[in-house]
Amino acid sequence: MGVAEQVLAGGEVYERAALEQLAVELVAARTAASAPAPELPGVGPRPEADELAEVLARNRGRVWQARQQLYADALDYQQAAAVLGVSDRQVSNLVSAGKLLTIDGPDGKRLPGWQFDLDTSGVRLRGIDRVAAVFAGRVLGLSAWMVTENPSLGGRTPAAALADGEVDLVVAVAERG
């Protein structure tokens, strides 16, 4: 005899009735949970396979366009060296150390421009390595995030907050997602 049967067999009448009702409710809940939902709450009906394929293709296209734009706006090593007032080799060392990020493209690696204060010669944002270490995404997602105003940063972009020296705050916001 199982535990449930023992409880049912030895319980008072009202306990037995309550347990039987609970068992009925649990079975009903399990049945409802395992049945395929015709519609997702607040979302609508599930998409057909061809609709889903179309949406995924559009999304891939948007991601590819964003990647192309990021690459087109990025600096090559010589441009980054000129902005920072250092040699190409020093830029390469900063990339190797994770202090600057790159994106691959048809003409080799380039450095997204948000990493530099282009208004102030010789200035790169500090803390990029720390933010990249906790950010849940790659350079494309991180780049989009870095140039988007964020309410957790008082409406500033993460890049602007880094430029203001608030590395710890940007890292904390990146960790929270």
Image: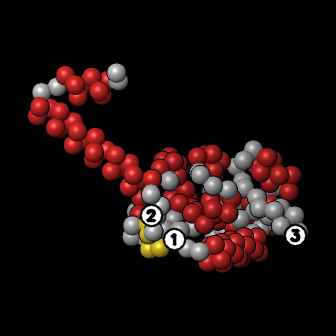
The CA distance from mark 2 to mark 1 is 9 Å
**Taking the image as drawn, is residue 155 in sight?**
no
**Taking the image as drawn, is residue 106 in sight?**
yes
Q: Mark 3 vs mark 2: which is more N-terminal? A: 2
- On screen, residue 162 versus residue 91, left or right, reads left
Give residue 38's quadrant in the image: bottom left
Q: Position of residue 122 (x, y in %)?
A: 70, 60
Name the residue carrying label 1.
Answer: 46
**Nearest the eye: 25 or 48:** 25
Up/down of 52 relative to 116, above or below: below
Tell me whether circle 3 and circle 2 mark residues in contact (CB < 8 Å). no
Name the residue carrying label 2.
Answer: 37
Up/down of 2 relative to 130, above or below: above
Q: Position of residue 128 (x, y in %)?
A: 63, 52
Q: Residue at x 51, y 65 (%)?
A: 157
Give amino acid for label 1: Arg
Mark on residue 106? 3
Q: Position of residue 150 (x, y in %)?
A: 46, 64
Q: Residue at x 73, y 73 (%)?
A: 64
Instruction: Tell us which disc is closer to us: 3 or 2.
Output: 2
Q: Residue at x 59, y 52 (%)?
A: 136
Give residue 108's quadrant in the image: bottom right
Element marked by disc 1:
loop
- On screen, residue 16 versus residue 27, left or right, reads left
Local packing at callout 3 (Cα closer than 10 Å; few below 14, some 14-19, many 20+) is few
Pick out the residue farthest to the right: 107
**Nearest the eye: 113 or 149:** 149
Q: Mark 3 vs mark 1: which is more N-terminal? A: 1
Give amino acid for label 3: Pro
Tell me whether circle 3 and circle 1 mark residues in contact (CB < 8 Å). no
